[in-house]
Image (cartoon, helix red, strand yellow):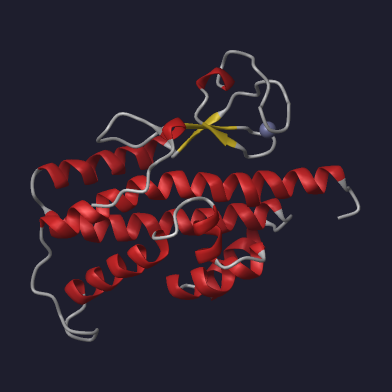
Amino acid sequence: MTSQSRHPHDSHQPGEAPVYYECPACGYLTTDPSFAGRGLPCEYCGIPDGGARTFPAERLRRVDARIRRYDAEGESEIVVILVATFLESLMEDMLARIMAAEGGSVKLRAAVLDAQRSVGVRIGKLFPTLTGEQFEDAAARFGFREFPHRWRALRAERNAFIHDAAFEGARESLGKQSAEEAISLLDDAYALFVRINNRFVAGEKRRRHDDPRR
Ligand SMILES: [Zn+2]
């Protein structure tokens, strides 16, 4: 499988989710554990250590671990279904974080996401509306050019398997190759979404801070 995880600073134990530390002030995500608990300032906004949270949250790391266990047990179909759902949740969280950085209230964020439930519309319309960039262009800029179409292919496979013939050509089974591609996408998703976060969440907050009239 063509993993695009060519970012050595994201390197982590194979077979588990990476750990990032989140600046509570600007939302910047870093792999540098010295930010968490050792009193070093955020490398992005400079505030002193404020008790960084980890990303992904602990409960998501537990889900990630379970998905990888299913993979080790050869439960390819479960792996594809769970990874496809997991990636959609990561995207939803990311869109909510971008809206929050823009000053959107909890109510507004919930209303927008409720009105735009389809993942295709969230990626194709909501993401560019919020960021001024197509998801494909952002992914390419951060070194993950193949990610959007690989993710689309995974969703199509999941749908062809789980929806009974309502979608393009039902699939009777999903094999090891599909599961391996799903796990590879999961690994890439963390690295890509952290870069999107640092550009459109931490970056936006800094712009608002530098220019309080915004
Ligand atoms: Zn910060």
x and y percentages locating residue 33 in the rendered image: 51, 21
Residue 58: quadrant of the picture? top left
**111 over 205 or under it: above or below:** below
**57 over 189 or under it: above or below:** above
Residue 108: quadrant of the picture? bottom right
Q: Is residue 203 visible?
A: yes
x and y percentages locating residue 54 in the rendered image: 49, 32
x and y percentages locating residue 59 in the rendered image: 37, 39
Residue 181: quadrant of the picture? bottom left
**145 over 120 or under it: above or below:** above
Q: Is residue 18 left or right of residue 196?
A: left
Q: Is residue 68 left or right of residue 105?
A: left
Q: Residue at x 58, y 70 (%)?
A: 126
Image quadrant holding the C terminus, namely: bottom right
Camera-side residue of 73 and 11: 11
Tell me which image quadrant ligand 1 sits in: top right
Q: Is residue 118 visible?
A: no
Q: Residue furthest top?
A: 38
Q: Residue at x 13, y 75 (%)?
A: 171
**211 over 7 or under it: above or below:** below
Camera-side residue of 165 and 106: 165
Q: Residue at x 55, y 21 (%)?
A: 36
